Amino acid sequence: MGMSHISNRSEKPSERWSRRGVLTVLGVVPAAVLTGCSGSAGAAESSSSGGSSATASAKAAKVPTVTVLPADGTKKADFTTPVTVTVADGTLATVKVTGNDGSTLAGTFNDAKTKWTSTKNPYSGTKYTVAAQARDAAAKTMTFTTKSPGETFVGYFTPEANSTSGVGMPVSINFTHAVTDRAAVQKAITVTAEPAVEIVGHWFSDTRLDFRPETYWAAGTKITLSLRLKDVEGQDGIYGIQSKDVTFDIGREQISTVDLSSKEMVVKRDGKTLATYPVSGGNAQHTTWSGIMVISERFKQTRMESSTVGLGDEYDISDVPHAQRLTTSGTFVHGNYWASTSVFGSENTSHGCVGLHDAKGANDTSVAGYKFYDSSMLGDVVIVKNSGEKTVAADNGLNGWNLSWAQWKAGSAV
């Protein structure tokens, strides 16, 4: 019985011990599993670290690739879009674009410095060299040549470069082709003055653009005309070719007023009366234009034929002395040797011109025709009033002063 009792007691501890052993073993297994997972994660981490290093090495091994548009070697590149330089696998350090004409194209980088864009388009018919360098890489040199435009236009300007004119002289530009994009062309032309004054352009037609201030130029003004028409598209497929600056000077102020009621012309120089001359204007059938006119051409002697102004064969005088043009349509202020001296100051007998007593041959310095011509210059103002005729059209000659400032500004395209 005792043995049986002892056996039973020893069995119980054994059973409890066995359970603990089992639990212990079970406890070891998760530990082993965790250890195994830990070991597996470490291996993966090690592998990942090795892959990252490989990627970094691969990146480090890549060389920056620089690309230019127009593409390197292009022979007939477009000149109507900017030049761009881009880099892959790097950043740009410097970009310089130089034309074979000595010009350079300025440009700007994007924030990442992976792209450079020229601020202006390249010029036509020009070979460009692009020197670009990516950071930590050797510099690269590429070239392209832009094509030449098909048709071109220019603007012929008045007054002539380096000339001196009167205070009424506008800057007038006549284009060799009709302009359909007036805004683009006008933006490419600037007129500035010293002393400074607001200057506005006015389109009289698709081939004529004039510039003037609100009132006559101040005596002694220096005017600069800047033409930046090269590669500006005036109309589809027709491009400007000029890029130049020219200057003009304004001389003293001379304004002459012709009153055809009193048949007298008063000449004022810088606000003071210089001379008064008796004149003869247009008769009742051929009245003289009224309004503000500007001397646009001067001839010591010239031929005048009535057929050129639509008056048949009424006159043909080969040696009209001291003729100064006031309108494109044929109005002049000129000397007259064929009429009686009594006509001047008393009758209007001409076919529309303003005449002063003069002598044949244009060499007599004592006559009014010679004196007025001698005192005048291109751009001087001649105002005609009481002629019985309407005001001359602003585009009939250089006579835009007959438009109010509001009317003038309304003719601007910008």
Image: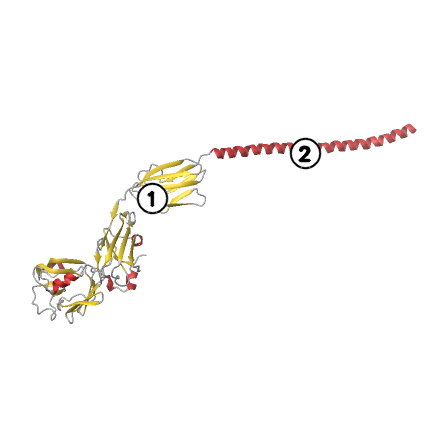
Label 1, on which residue?
104
Amino acid marked by disc 2: Leu
The furthest residue to the top? 3
- Whichever of callouts 2 and 1 sits on the residue coming sooner in the sequence is 2
Give the percent coordinates (x, y) of residue 103.
31, 44
* x, y percent for residue 359: 8, 62
Report the front residue among 32 and 226.
226
Residue that appears at 51% across and 33% down: 57
Residue 171 image position (x, y, % from top left): 25, 57
Residue at the image position 21 percent from the left and 57 percent from the top: 164
Q: Quadrant of residue 38?
A: top right
Label 1 environment density (alpha carbons within 10 Å; few <14, some 14–19, many ≥20): some
How far is disc 2 from disc 1 in space, using C-alphas? Answer: 70 Å
Report the coloring of the rendering: secondary structure
Q: Nearer the viewer, residue 63 or 306?
A: 63
Q: Which residue is mark 2?
A: 34
Is label 1 in a helix, a strand or a loop? Answer: strand
